[in-house]
Amino acid sequence: MTRVLLAGESWISTATHVKGFDEFSSTTFHTGADAFIAAAAAQGLEVEQMYAHDVPGSFPRSVEALSVYDVIILSDIGANSFVLPPEVFLQGRRMDNPLIALSEWTRAGGGLMMAGGYLSFTGFQARANFARSPIAQVLPVTMLESDDRVEAPQGAPIAIAAPDHPAAAGWSELVGSAPTLLGYNMVKAREDATVVATVGDDVLVATREVGKGRSLVWTSDIGPHWCPEDFLAWDGFAPLVGSMLRWLAAR
């Protein structure tokens, strides 16, 4: 069985409610991965999600620990969550860097995916900060040093650039009916990467073989708002998810 770990794609929000003289606060947990996980399940693939608030203390920090997974996805979670575990940030202790381990794991045969979002790639106000991280060298794209978001409220159309690539299998012929996306992270494909699909004039899906492993990027989100509900309901969404994950797992 292919083991897939999705790290991130959750958040906690706090709201202040003012009712005349009185006010109170409420806290809500959110996850944006449900549709992606359901799409993978429809393709026969089980995805384990590690929520963003669990990543600093629980994400595997060694190649050996990472090796229980075939595919690891980082989605809308910044580099700080990996390099600042409680032992480092609160106690000033030295710890293994999981982004170094993730880079080594990929070269050794793992399948690494980064999905877009406000805290992916370089991200909103450059806060995701992966451009200078150890995994930057194994991804199929280079990242900007400044805020890399492209907001497209009018909708950005997608197109297939490599219809015969395995990561395009099952959905390339449906792309003509795909709803537009509402945003993505702008990146540049490396010379040894394959651009499988584009959004507007930019990279949407790119792949790369690195050492014995593979890497892939999906530069839009895996849920709203960049990936709107009609895109998640599109007939091509589940095949898209399945083909990306199967390619990463070399299945």
Image: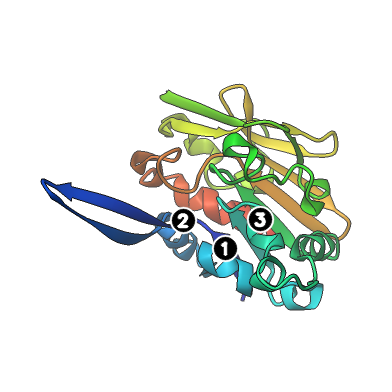
Q: In the image, what residue occupies the spot 62% across and 56% down?
A: 74
Confirm whether residue 158 shows in the render.
no
Return the residue nearer the eye: 146 or 104: 146
Residue wearing tag 2? 36
Residue wearing tag 3? 80
Mark 3 falls on what kind of element?
helix
Q: Quadrant of the N terminus?
A: bottom right
Q: Are marks 2 and 1 in contact (CB under 8 Å)?
A: yes
Above or below residue 190? Residue 53 is: below
Above or below residue 210? Residue 155 is: above
Image coordinates of residue 107 in percent, x first then y, are 85, 60
Q: Earlier in the sequence, mark 1 or mark 3?
A: 1
Mark 1 falls on what kind of element?
strand
Residue wearing tag 1? 6
Q: Amino acid at mark 3?
A: Asn
Q: CA distance from mark 1 to mark 3?
A: 17 Å
In this image, 153 relative to 168: left or right? left
Which of the 4 image quarters holds residue 14?
Answer: bottom left
